[in-house]
Amino acid sequence: MDKIFKVNKKLSYCMAIITVVSLISGIMFTFILKESDYNKVTESLNTFMESVINNELNYGLSLKSNLVTNIIYVFIIWGLGISFIGLPIILFLYFIKVFSIGFTISSIMLNYGLKGLVYSFIYIFPHNILNVFIFGFLSLYSVIYSFRLSSSFFKKESIDFKPILNKHKYVLLVALLGVIITSLYGTYIMPYMLKIVLKFLK
């Protein structure tokens, strides 16, 4: 039991390090973009901001896109947790998830200066921050499950995985509920809050 705790503790530290590194990597990546790619990012941001302020967002399509993306991500990470090869892929997927948030923050701030600090805060808080915790929790638990599965297989240990799998299913349900809530917030409430700020700071 003590050995499992130590393994879980090390994996928790590993996840924390990955979170910080991926966030910083996403922020720094904006500075090394080619001019053509940076212009595309700027155009995309401006189009989104104009759509928000002019009430031209397609909320149904946006919600569908957010839900589908997040739910697929949840199922992939959860599914990899019950496979032998899941551990490195789970960590990579989590890295990409946090990386994209860091990239979004830096892109908004570079394009809108000091205003971008406020815009990026509204764009990521609280739903994207919650997503980091949700996917971090899901990834950590999936990595732990995958580690235990691989360890028992190679060491030929007999472990009752039924209670562990039941917990794994519970984690899946919590993660799904979490991303549904954050997707709803990101689709309907975030644009409304952003619109108010855009009009105020314009």
Image: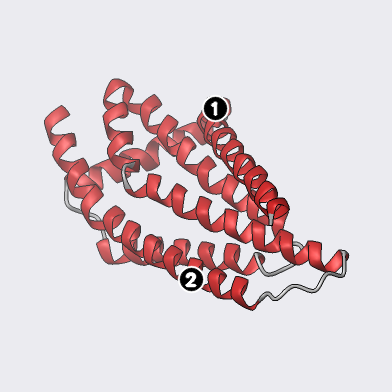
- Mark 2 crowd level (few <14, some 14–19, many ≥20, 10 Å Cα): few
- Which residue sits at x=34%, y=59%? 183
Indicate the position of residue 139 as horizontal and vertical percent values. 58, 55
Task: Give whichever of 163, 116 is nearer the camera.
Answer: 163
The secondary structure type at the circle numbered 1 is: helix
- In the image as oriented, which residue stretches furthest toward the right? 155
For the question of whether residue 155 can be seen, the reply is yes
Name the residue carrying label 2.
170
| Label number found at residue 74 | none
Spatial separation of the CA atoms under disc 2 and disc 1: 36 Å
Indicate the position of residue 49 as horizontal and vertical percent values. 27, 41
Q: Is 6 left, or right, of 179 in this rendering?
A: right
- Which residue sits at x=70%, y=49%? 7
| Label number found at residue 28 | 1
Sequence order check, earlier mark of 2 and 1:
1
Task: Give whichever of 72, 11 is nearer the camera.
Answer: 11
